[in-house]
Image: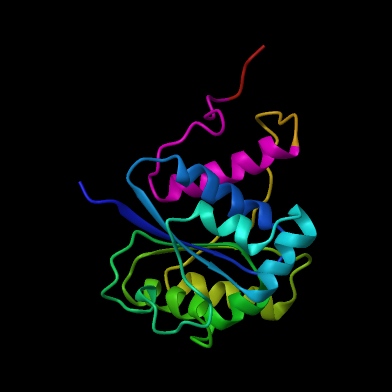
Amino acid sequence: MPNKRLIIAITGATGAVYGVRLLQVLRNTAGIETHLLISDAGVLSLHQELDLNRKEVEPLADVVHHVRDIGASVASGSFQSEGMIIAPCSMKTLAAVAHGLSDNLIARAADVVLKERRRLVLMVRETPFNLAHLRNMTAVTEMGGIIFPPLPGFYHRPQSIAEMVDHTVGRVLDLFAIPHSLTPRWAGIKQE
């Protein structure tokens, strides 16, 4: 059985840990081939938030594409994939996707995923949202994308930031029907 391909992009919003954790989990998931894109601002976020550089993150992916390589395989609809996750997704990238501005490979790959009717998940990171952000999120949703702000859940009583990150990453993987054991499943409210 051929591998399923999944495109992962890391942009300059806060929350680089989500992109890195996705890559770590998918690295150990059989049958998944990851294609990584990191924006220049994403590199800055990796360094600022996780003390990581590009050369430490790229080996987590199966294939790495430079964000300016607009002729890369992921820029074509003929590139077969399950879809794309932008984790985290800056408001600049959200705007580029919402308006079809394929000015770099991240925005182009997202545009391709949408036009081919594949799954696009944007883990948007900003707070509070202004009207432009909300309108861009609406536009992407109307095009078939999924807006997934990485908001932590507390019903599973996380004991650490890592558990909160894993819960969110697990929910994103659920959207692609990728099995995982990152977080317990909701079993209903416990009655006393």
Where is residue 50? Give x, y as percent: 74, 53
Where is residue 80? Give x, y as percent: 28, 66
Q: Residue at x 45, y 40 (%)?
A: 28
Where is residue 96? Give x, y as percent: 56, 82
Pick the front one: 41 or 176? 41
Q: Quadrant of residue 87?
A: bottom right
* Residue 1 seen by the camera: yes
* Magenta residue span: 161-188
Q: How is the image coloured?
A: rainbow
Q: Residue furthest top?
A: 192
* Residue 14 seen by the camera: no
Where is residue 1? Give x, y as percent: 20, 46
Look at the image and say whether residue 91 sits in the magenta stretch: no
Q: Residue at x 46, y 45 (%)?
A: 27
Tell me if 144 is positioned left or right of 89 in this view: left
Look at the image and say whether residue 170 sits in the magenta stretch: yes
Q: Quadrant of the C terminus?
A: top right
Q: Residue furthest front?
A: 55
Judge whether 66 appears above or below 47 on screen: below
Judge whether 66 appears above or below 127 on screen: below
Q: Quadrant of residue 123?
A: bottom right
Q: Residue at x 40, y 43 (%)?
A: 178
